[in-house]
Amino acid sequence: MTKSLKIRSLGKRIYREPTTEQAEKYRRIRDMISSEIPEIKAEARAIRQGRQAKMSEAIQLLKSERELRGLSLADVGQRTGLSKSAISKLENNEDANPTVNTLTKYADALGMTLGIVLTEKG
């Protein structure tokens, strides 16, 4: 007994219509996933906020050190090759997402070394 496949063509692509059983299976999977989406989004949001908090803390440490040393944005800009506006945005934007290279340049400008520590979760 051969099953009849429904085929439709869209340009150069050919799509096979799912069987009733396949369509039901895909619907169940979609329903399962859609019920999990709010939880997944909340977990992802919490992870992002935790990472952002750590990044903000590191940036604020650099800013505090810059101010402690009496350096202006222009001074740091000359030492890093970054513009004053880029440094200001980095220091004042809560959503700042600098590269490791940018943070390394900033730390170098202050006579510091950027250290990255990897630890086990928990």
Image (cartoon, rainbow, N blue to C red):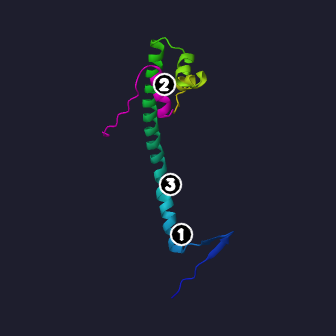
- Category of crowding for the residue at label 3, using alpha-carbon neighbours closer than 10 angstroms: few (below 14), some (14–19), many (at least 20): few
121 drawn magenta:
yes
Q: Which span of residues is magenta-colored?
A: 98-122
Q: Residues within 10 Å of mark 1 (few under 14, many from 20)?
A: few
Tell me what residue is drawn at x 48 percent, y 19 percent: 63
Q: Which residue lies furthest to the top in this view?
A: 70
Q: Which type of secondary structure does the marked residue at label 1 adopt?
A: helix
Q: Is residue 72 above or below residue 39?
A: above
Residue that badge 2 annotates: 106
Which numbered tag is attached to residue 34? 3
Identify the residue at horizontal 38%, vertical 30% (top origin): 115
Distance from the alpha carbon under mark 1 to that under mark 2: 55 Å
Residue at which label 1 appears: 23
Q: In this view, does 117 lie above or below 78?
A: below
- Residue at x 45%, y 30% (from the top left corner): 55
Residue 25: percent from left, percent from top: 48, 68
Q: Residues within 10 Å of mark 2 (few under 14, many from 20)?
A: many
